Amino acid sequence: MNPQLTQISTIIIGSIISLGILAAGFGYFFAQWKRGGNEYNTNLINNLKDLLKSEQEKNAELLKEKQELFITLQAQIVVLQKETAELRGTVLGQNKMIDQYKELLTNRNPELEKTLKEISVFLKGLSGMAHTAENRNVEIDKATEREDGNVLRKK
């Protein structure tokens, strides 16, 4: 064979092999690039799924807390309504008593006034006696602490 022909055939075969290797390199590069993009997308999807799951869990917890708070507030409302009803009853009762006292005081007769004055004098006297007894008890307590005088109580 002709040496030039072998050289040309070697060059052509070498060029074809080089182009094949080059094409394989591009294919490998493209596959890696595509896989990297797919991996990125897969990671992004997984991260978003995790985020969605955590947000759903938080939402469930907040809903549970909201329901508990709602139940607690309803119980407080019931208690406050009961207390309000009791206070309303008390106020109405006091208003009735005030009206009765007003009626008594506007329709007084001289005999009732005399009785009320006597009761007032009696109560003042009773108050004075209680005050005197209180003073005496204070004196006895002081004397007991000092241990002098005629002490009626002992320790």
Image: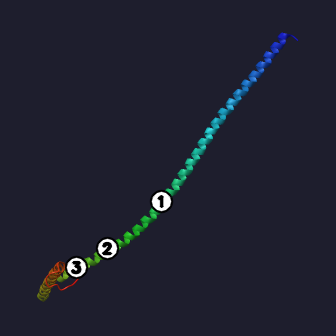
Say whether disc 2 or disc 1 marks the residue closer to the N-terminus.
Answer: 1
Disc 3 on helix, strand or loop? helix
Residue at label 3?
Answer: 99
Measured as percent of width and height from the top left, residue 141 is found at 18, 80
Quadrant position of residue 119: bottom left
Work out whether 120 lies above or below 79: below
Q: Nearer the viewer, mark 2 or mark 1?
A: 1
Q: Is residue 22 left or right of residue 150?
A: right
User: Crowding at label 3, few (<14), some or many (≥20) Cα neighbours within 10 Å?
Assistant: few
Dividing the picture into quadrants, the one containing residue 135 is: bottom left
Q: Residue at x 59, y 41 (%)?
A: 44
Q: Quadrant of the C terminus?
A: bottom left
Sequence-wise, the earlier of marks 2 and 3 is 2
Q: Mark 3 and 1 residues: CB-CB less than 8 Å, in contact?
A: no
Point out the tag, 3 or 1, that comes first from the N-terminus.
1
Q: Amino acid at mark 2?
A: Arg
Q: Give the residue at mark 1.
A: 65
